[in-house]
Image (tube, coloured by chain):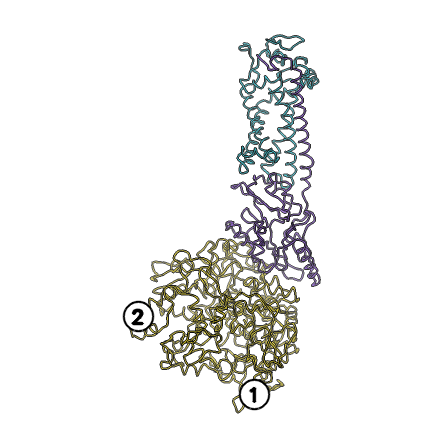
Amino acid sequence: MAEVSILVDITKCIGCKSCEVACKQWWQLPAEIASWTGSYQSHSDLSYNRWTMVLFREKETADGGVDWIFRKEQCMHCQKPACVAVCPTQALARRPDGIVDYDPAKCIGCQYCVEFCPFDVPRYDAAANKISKCNMCADRVDAGMEPACVKACPTDALTFGPREKLLAGAEARVAELKEAGVAAQVYNPEAVGGTHYVYVLPQGQPSEFGFPENLRYPSTIGLWKSGLQPVGEGVAALSLVVTLAAAASAAFFNRNRPDGGEHHE
Amino acid sequence: MSSPVRNGRIRMFNLAERLTHGAAALSFVVLLLSSASMMWSWARWLMPVFGGPRWVALVHVWAGYLFTLALVVALLGGFRSWVLRVLRWGPNDLAFVRHFLAVYFSRHSYADAPPQERFNGGMKAWSLVAIAGGLGVAVTGLLLAFKGSVGHAGFQVVLGLHVLFALLLTAGVIGHVYLAAFHPEARQSFGSMFGDGTVSLEYASTHHAAWLEEVGVKPQRAGRAGVPERAH
Amino acid sequence: MTNHPRDFENTDVALIIGSNLAENHPLAFRWLEKAREERGAKVIVVDPRFTRTAARADLYAPIRPGTDIAFIGGLINLALSTGRYHEEYVRTYTNASFLVKEGFDFQDGYFTGYDATKRAYDKSSWAYETDADGKPVRDMTLAHPRSVFQLMKKHYARYDVETVVSVTGVPKERYLEIADAFLASAAPEKTGSLMYAMGGTQHTVGSENVRAYAILQLLLGNIGRPGGGVNAMRGHANVQGSTDLALLWDNLPGYLAVPKEDIHPDLATYLAKETPKAGYWTNKPKFVVSLLKAFFDANATRENDFGYDWLPKAPAGVNCSHLAIFERMSKGLIRGMISFAQNVVIDGAHSGFEAKAMEKLEWLVATDLFETETAAFWKRPGADPKQIKTEVFLLPAASFLEKSGSVTNTGRVLQWRHQASKPLGEARSDAWIASQIMLRLKRLYAGDSSPAAVPINNLYWPYGEEPDPEQVAREINGYDVASRKLLPSFAKLADDGSTASGCWVYTGFFQEELGNLADSRKTDDPSGLGYYPGWGYAWPLNRRILYNRAGADPQGAPWAADKKTIWWDAAQKKWVGYDVPDFVPTKAPGDPGGTDPFIMNAEGVGRIFSNTMAEGPFPEHYEPMECPVNNIFSEVNLNPAVHLFDPVEHPVGSFDKYPVICSTWRVTEHMGAYTRHIPWLAELVPVLWAEISPSLAKARGLKTGDKVKIRSARDEVEAYALVTPRVRPLRVLGKQVEQVGLNWHFGYTGYVTGDIANRLSPYVGDANTWIPEYKAFLVDVEGVK
């Protein structure tokens, strides 16, 4: 199955939040009327019932003007998803098409994904004892539709399609912007093997758009999964084997007892 | 001082010890099985026992609190009667440990070792493992439960350590359970720990002769053999 | 608009002035982004505030609210003084070459003919010099000192760059950059599009602002061409449709004037006065008589002036605009009001006054989706319900999804919508409600022959208990009265009573053979220019770009190969191309009038000089009613033709007491006051905030999140401070002038509530349309302890 992606062209985003509303509508997530954030941003953070939102950042430019950045935030659908690696119950799973899908029925609320996600995306709800996050509308994708946010985007700042095509499109767009004097870049971070949400960022560091400063795939997963746990499992298994051997040995040495080794008072 | 022996039996574990141990044992079983059902897909069938995906992690956390409580009570309440004692090692304890593998595999009898205190060398060693492993798993577990205190990176490291401690402790528990419940000689203590706390004088004499002496009870039949005569 | 949103993709440069296009028309903005991506188009945004549209602009300039004419006047001056205008287009397609009569002048801020007591002009001197046949005299060299071209040049020579930037507050470098970018569209192969909205119109000089835009676009040769145009970005899906169908207070359907009691005593007089001597409007009698036939059907006969007497007439000297209605309502002169989806308590000017005026009503019918602030005016904060005698009827209305019918978008495209679900509860469509009212009136007046009863009894009302939107649509389209067959074009309308049409500009959208073309959804686009002629129906006659004769040069060839619209095919002897010609299809370029693209004007060309405006033939800068500086273009501060309301009832603030400029505007998350009733939208913008510059915040000791009080001379509101570098003080005539912006979506009903920003706005309107000056007034801002 060919991999899919969503391309976010920041240079076309008008910050209208249609994506936020479309997501809530498709997934029937309740509104969260909260106190004001002090900016155009609807809420201060993602939440259990808010899988995507537009971050608003203002930056004064060298020439005395303002850059007003609108950046859609949601699960990045990593090529190498830490959440999937740590999810004990496969509630999170990377599909062949690259979507990091989520099955709430399997979620046990352990929140390992919350702790390991390098983008700080999954959100936990204590009442439901589950996490939630964007699953790129896997249900719509399976039905041959584009994700709800993409469908609602009025300016094509969001486009959905085969990954290779979108990546090529992103590169072409960046080349175009560079020609126009904008030091744009594609954000598809290698640290997590690439992401299925690919961004075209105009000039500036990814951190100015609210991405992690030093994005890393958590090496602690290796320490745990390939180090500490196998050692512990080995020791426990050894203990089990030795003990079974001891039981066999006990049976052998007590074979002549009429009671078969049973102790009697 | 009257003799602690009643009807040929002597109390080895008092009620507080039995309750504490029981709580630790119960919570450990729940912790082990619930985590197994979460961690290993071959054990997933156990999850419904703990309330399925909705509850299993919560059951694990609350069992962890119970385990931690039992551990703390044991360490504090049994500080003199248990902790200090298992920390005190004499030549007989070391000698017991040297005999341990043979005893474990039933090649030799307990009686082949020098007279043991209420906690023999093996029990002392296990106690130390249990205290260390229990503290490790409890402290890491608490940090995971109150994860705000360690941050994401801290959580990630602590989680690995928790798994390691839990598995090491499990390794010890396997041996402990075998000895206490299935070993042809040692298993009488199972009935004691999960019963009225007494062992027969005969058992005490062969396994904990030094203890009997300590409490002023004459061992039933001392001697090299130490092996209880088969009554029948 | 002359063009349509999809056409933005064909532009080379867009000037967005007085419109927050990206926020309020996100889908239209999409095509501008396409133009930028595919054609390298430049997007220029001129707005007091750095909006989300500005965030996506190539060039942004802040501007002092109310100074558009200075801004555009400066561009006109630059275009003329540096030769950056489309010379052939101007010479041929505009009235630049026309001579103006001797005696016309402009002195000290006044054009000739001003009567200060009437605050009105006698426009007789604003006229062309004519020859013996009454035909305007032209000087094709444009050199005659009384030619429109030279008069224009002289008028705007006063709008030099230094003056313009000091009045508007636009940084000079940025102004020149913008001028260079937009005036580049004067090249015949280039086009520039100009988009405006209420930021342009909601001023005492609103109509002249739009005139200024139009003059600039005529000079640059940008009208009638793909990627060009003067493009009014109308507020929602059907604002265009509602004005087409007489939402405007002085219009009958199809932009026919409302008859006035004093000057239009009978049909003949009305037609004589309202019908020009030349141009397409010479057909006006056909449209008027057909409209009367649609209203009164068989009861309208030649003998009874087709029922003209039964039309209500505007009384002499009485203005029926929104402002004037509420002024009269406050005096107890209006007994009842039916409000269809109008929320005046939120969107009225000096809206606390308008809410108070409603207390004088005996009855109010509020027809809406839910109880709006207007329906709940009697229990608004501060009102005492016991003292309000108004009987309020709240009629639940069906939403747009719950009924069928057409909407007409800002590009004049009619699109039919089908009912998606049944109305909730007792809700009914507006058509049902209107029809029921009339049916009951007819029953009430049956057999009555009093003057009030006659029009009602004669009214043709075939809609019945459950009106059928298609039946209404057919009547709007028009039909042959005898056969009841639908007409394919308004060219078929007659003034003899043989045809009927409810709105002549729409005739053709619903045809006998082709059916309902508003419901057509063909997606082929032979032009490649985004015309999509089979998608919906663009009035008039499915023309996608108005005045498209101007899209070809005088000889009939397209100005640019990549922007062909229609052109003259000499072999076929007719105009051919991608669009429906806005021209006589067989009139050759060499024929008389063959180079007159502006067929709705009697003179056939675009008007740089116009005698139709209340305050002058050329747009002239006047200050807003509440202004931070005196006008430096003349001694006249305020547009001399605006009506002044009672200054006691509606106090006017001065700069020394109210030193901050304020405008009210919208945000993309909300639609009027409605979306605060929808949780998913309410959560997006939960409070009323006031956008304040860092310097003003510092001066007043404010930070983001503080409660602030904003006071105008009329009222005060509370809001939360949003301190942002996106709002900057402007340098205006040597003064630093601060500004603050408020959205007007808030009110006291819904999931999220807040003060009503329009309580602050002034009670004064444009001199032509009477649209209130919401976009420029004075306030002060202080922290709430």
Q: What is the quadrant of residue C747 in the picture?
A: bottom left
Check whether the beta carbons of the residues at disc 1 and disc 2 lie within 8 A of each other. Answer: no
Q: How many marks?
A: 2
Chain ID at mark 2: C
Is B204 in front, or is B184?
B184
Residue C618 at x, y = what percent? 55, 78
Q: In this orientation, does residue C606 appear?
A: no
Chain the render paints cyan: B
Q: Chain C shown in which color?
A: yellow
Chain the render paints purple: A
Residue B10 at x, y = what percent? 56, 13
Vertical side of C128 occupied by C311: above or below: above
> Residue at point 66% right, 37% down?
B157
Residue C535 at x, y = what percent? 54, 67
Label 2: few (<14), some (14–19) or many (≥20) C-alpha neighbours in 10 Å: some
Badge 1 marks a residue whose secondary structure is loop
Is C291 in front, or is A69?
C291
Query: Would you name the residue on which mark 2 appears?
Result: C445
> Residue at point 48% right, 73% down?
C507
Type of residue at label 1? Answer: Val
Seen as rendered, the residue at the extreme left is C447
Quadrant containing the C terminus of chain B in the rendered view: top right
Which mark identifies residue C292? none
Residue A84 at x, y = what percent? 63, 43
Q: What is the quadrant of residue C315 in the picture?
A: bottom left
Q: What is the quadrant of residue C702 in the picture?
A: bottom right
Type of residue at label 2? Answer: Tyr
Badge 2 marks a residue whose secondary structure is helix
Which of the two discs, 1 and 2, sits closer to the camera?
A: 2
Lateral position of residue C665 relative to residue C343, left or right: right
Label 1: few (<14), some (14–19) or many (≥20) C-alpha neighbours in 10 Å: some
Which mark identifies residue C137? 1
